[in-house]
Amino acid sequence: MVAAVAGVVLGACATPGPAGVSAGPASVGPAETPLRVVTYNVGGAVSGPTPPEVVAGALAEPPPADIYVLQEIWSREHLRGIAAALAPLYHAAYAPTLRIGILSALPLSDCRVFQPRGASAKYGAFRCEVSSLAVAGVHLDPIDKERTESGFVRMGFVRSARAVLREVFTSTSRSRAAREVTFWLSTWDDERAIVAGDFNTVPFTRTIRHMNRNFDEVLRGTGDYLDGTYWKVDGRILPRIDFIFYAGALERVDAGIIEEQAGDHYPVVAEFLLR
């Protein structure tokens, strides 16, 4: 049985962009102008909220995105500040229990929260509709880890290898949550869907294999597939724990990792043609 759904429509704060200014396509529908999507855990789990201008600086690589899916957003004011620091302004929706925010050049509607059984209180999925597109932000429970005094993750080779093997071969809170989230998302008959966020696990694990059975992954087949997105690691190998998945009438035309630092992650960007 699927976990209980917090099916309350959240009071999303909508902020229209300036008149005559567009961040992307005028509508979500068949077009030759790519739809640009960025997912980014802006950091702050250890140090507190990352200032909006610092987040915007990490996202300054042109062109601006049509949709930003953001994790570690501490308040509506934090999200509004990031929206204001970007250009142009965006419609905004926020899930306070999950600290997930979505910014969109087009209005957001029917925003709902889902928290899987067994997940910690602040982890789960946040889904909104953008015209004919469903966008879901995801943040899954982290793996237990130690940090240095400066906040860098320190696990060591043996402990890291054991953690990865557990993620690959056994059921974990992340793999169970991924199953529940995909089942929840399947209850809507969406023409197009994008699922993006911090999955707190790496490629080839049970969690990501399950996602790949239901969605395509934007970095598959690119040179960035095995590159890291979490840089605050006391070691040379950086894990990739941030993903963008897609399904339906979407064609990926480009994707990559933006190696800019605000918090402790790198953003992931993808461009799609809508069919």
Image (cartoon, rainbow, N blue to C red):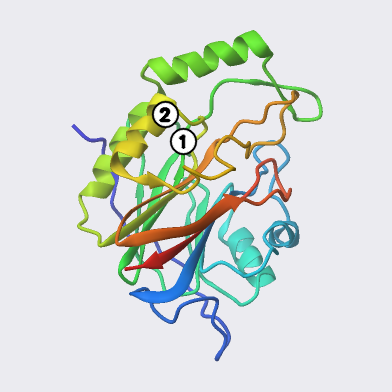
Most foreground residue, 82 or 65: 65
Q: Quick check: 162 above or below 4?
A: above
The type of residue carrying mark 2 is: Arg
The type of residue carrying mark 1 is: Leu
Q: Report whether 89 appears left or right of 246.
A: right
- Looking at the rendered structure, which numbered label has been put on residue 174? 2
Do the residues under discs 1 and 2 have CB atoms within 8 angstroms?
yes
Q: Quadrant of the N terminus?
A: top left
| Count of number-bearing discs | 2
- Mark 2 packing: few (<14 Cα in 10 Å), some, or many (20+)? many
Is residue 74 among the parts visible in the rendering?
no
Q: Position of residue 49 (x, y in %)?
A: 68, 49
Most foreground residue, 5 or 36: 36
What residue sits 62% from the left and 70% below the top? 63
Question: Given the current orientation, which residue lies at the most extreme right position?
Answer: 150
Q: Position of residue 151 (x, y in %)?
A: 75, 30
- Looking at the rendered structure, which numbered label has been put on residue 95? none
Q: Position of residue 222 (x, y in %)?
A: 53, 45
